[in-house]
Image (cartoon, grey):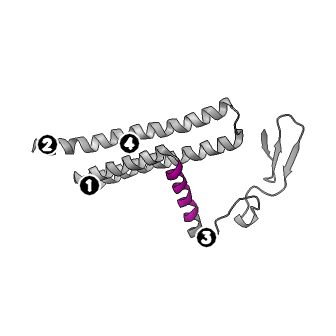
Amino acid sequence: MQIKLNESANTTIVQSDMTTKMSISQPLERSPQQRTKAWRVATSIGVSFKYAAAGVTYAFNTQRNFRIHCVMGTIAITIGALLHLTGVEMAVICIVSGLVLTLELLNTAIESVVDLTVGQTYHELAKIAKDCAAGAVLISAFASVLVGLCLVVPKALLLFVH
């Protein structure tokens, strides 16, 4: 499928077999009230938070790795508090833990969109998209472990020495 933009910011979608052309005459930038094809549009900031919470809840309830990362992040923060890490050190642990959870949410979103697009069929590009998203989570998890070790091990060694 090819997507072409013309001068008036309209979109033309052309299927690869060139048998069907579909033009969208509305501009790409539309207000939420004009997005009639959207499933639901957040009408307020409270509703936006509700949708975001629904996404986090969905990931927690359905994604084993998201739950594992939540537990590991909680453990890291608890250990940091017990070792009396500085505010900056605790902030770093919170940031890297949040990054892992954020990437896990994005991984879930990418996997869902890919599954929606290809259905039950195999496609090499779908595999690449899913593998790369999972790889991003893996790299962030490794980095967070390294950060945690760099911050926790010196403080833990001091406790055992004294």
Q: Residue at x 58, y 61 (%)?
A: 51
Q: In the drawing, what numbered circle is on residue 81? A: 1
| Among the two numbered marks 4 and 1 on one chain, the one whose residue lies closer to the N terminus | 1
Q: Nearer the viewer, residue 95 or 162?
A: 162
Secondary element type, mark 3: loop
| Among the two numbered marks 4 and 3 on one chain, the one whose residue lies closer to the N terminus | 3
| Among the two numbered marks 3 and 1 on one chain, the one whose residue lies closer to the N terminus | 3
The residue beneath circle 2 is 160
Q: Amino acid at mark 2?
A: Phe
Q: Residue at x 28, y 56 (%)?
A: 87
Q: Amino acid at mark 3?
A: Ser
Residue 53: where, in percent of width, then height? 53, 60
Q: Residue at x 70, y 64 (%)?
A: 32
Q: Nearer the viewer, residue 6 or 129?
A: 129
The residue beneath circle 4 is 144
The residue beneath circle 3 is 44
- Tell me how far mark 2 sits from mark 3, CA to CA: 52 Å
Vertical relation: 161 (above or below) 41: above
- Tell me how far mark 2 sits from mark 4, CA to CA: 24 Å
Q: Is residue 62 left or right of residue 140?
A: right
Give the magenta part as a residue range.
49-62
- Tell me how far mark 4 sits from mark 1, CA to CA: 17 Å
Residue 37: where, in percent of width, then height? 76, 58
Q: Residues within 10 Å of mark 3 (few under 14, many from 20)?
A: few
Q: Is residue 112 left or right of residue 34?
A: left
Cβ–Cβ under 8 Å for marks 2 and 4: no
In the image, residue 33 lies in the stretch drawn in magenta: no
Vertical relation: 18 (above or below) 11: above
| Among the two numbered marks 2 and 3 on one chain, the one whose residue lies closer to the N terminus | 3
Cβ–Cβ under 8 Å for marks 2 and 3: no
Q: Amino acid at mark 4?
A: Ser
